[in-house]
Amino acid sequence: MNRLRWLIVALTVAVAAGGAALAFPEYKRAEWPNTDFSKASVSLDEIMSGGPPRDGIPPIDNPRFLPVSQITGLADTEPVVGVVIGGEAKAYPLSILIWHEIANDTVGGVPVAVTFCPLCNAAMVFDRRVDGRVLDFGTSGMLRNSDLIMYDRQTESWWQQFMGEAIIGELTGTVLKVLPARLESWRNFRERAPEGLVLIPNNPNMRNYGRNPYAGYDASASPFLYDGAAPEGVAPLSRVVSLEDRSQAWSLDLVEKKGEIILGDGVVITWSSGQNSALGDSIIANGADVGNVLVRRKTGEGWEDVTYFVDFAFAFHAFHPDAPIHGE
């Protein structure tokens, strides 16, 4: 049963029983004997079960890759997370990440966690090193503001994926370094990194890769397991673009309409057509064209990538309620 179907069943049962839908159950503490719940930066009341148990959505720990030239079956417009570090380029198709949410990997000698929270459309890449120690991440099965809560296997601290910050446990308050990455079409990655590597399933039969288990989600009127305030001026499940400081965001419609938004310090946001939504059609390759966003800075030596995000508006607003969202 995919997560949305599980949620529908669970919510129906909870409502029929007159109980709070999927609120944080106290018995979960016993399932996490190594998590220090006395240290927390958020209230447990804000955390809900997302349905699957710990690692019920299994992270990828020993990723397999093929060269770009050997990849078949990916449509030109399918979305991938493109990462380039130290001259090494790797692409992580959302057709795989949507089923696993986390890939623990190394790119250019840097230990990374490539993450994707489908419920928030949040694709983020983190440096896994903290105080000289390399962490390995899994899925806790819990959500806050509908966003994936990860955990590290070394301390079993819980981490808010949208913030890259530990919110419960020994490492509470620690913030992971976010690394520049592009949410781009397979064609765009292939053209800029023809010698790159592409993530393939460890077991092609493990999941229905290429299909979207959240079919129709980005056309929903409201997000799952989110009862916070909605952003003003944009639909909750519309996409917004923000930079690393998250001080403001721009609606994807605005970026598409303008084609280019010029900011200070030589930073330019651009939009071009040719990338499917991973969260629309049941077949990812058939998803609506939401386009490619690119954020770069002009320097004396040319262009360099700037860290950016393309998330659902409700998630941006939930974690940054005072930050403006520039609409049309």
Image: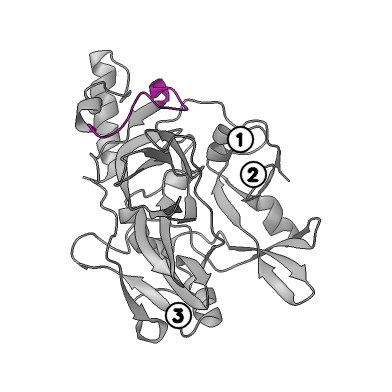
The x, y position of residue 190, in whole percent, is 49, 79
Counting residues from the start of the chain, the first of labels 3 and 2 encountered is 3
Counting residues from the start of the chain, the first of labels 1 and 2 encountered is 2
Tell me the number on the disc at residue 246. Answer: 2
- Seen at 57% across and 52% down, the residue is 310
Which of the 4 image quarters holds residue 191? bottom right
Spatial CA distance of label 1 from label 2 is: 7 Å
Picture colour scheme: one colour
Circle 2 packing at 10 Å, graded few (<14), some (14-19), many (20+), is: some
Bounds of the magenta segment: 32-46
- Image position of 139 with respect to 31: above or below: below
Spatial CA distance of label 3 from label 2 is: 30 Å
Front residue (pair 179, 59): 179
Circle 3 packing at 10 Å, graded few (<14), some (14-19), many (20+), is: many
Q: Return the residue at label 3.
A: 196
> Which amino acid is tagged 1?
His
Q: Are marks 1 and 3 in contact (CB under 8 Å)?
A: no
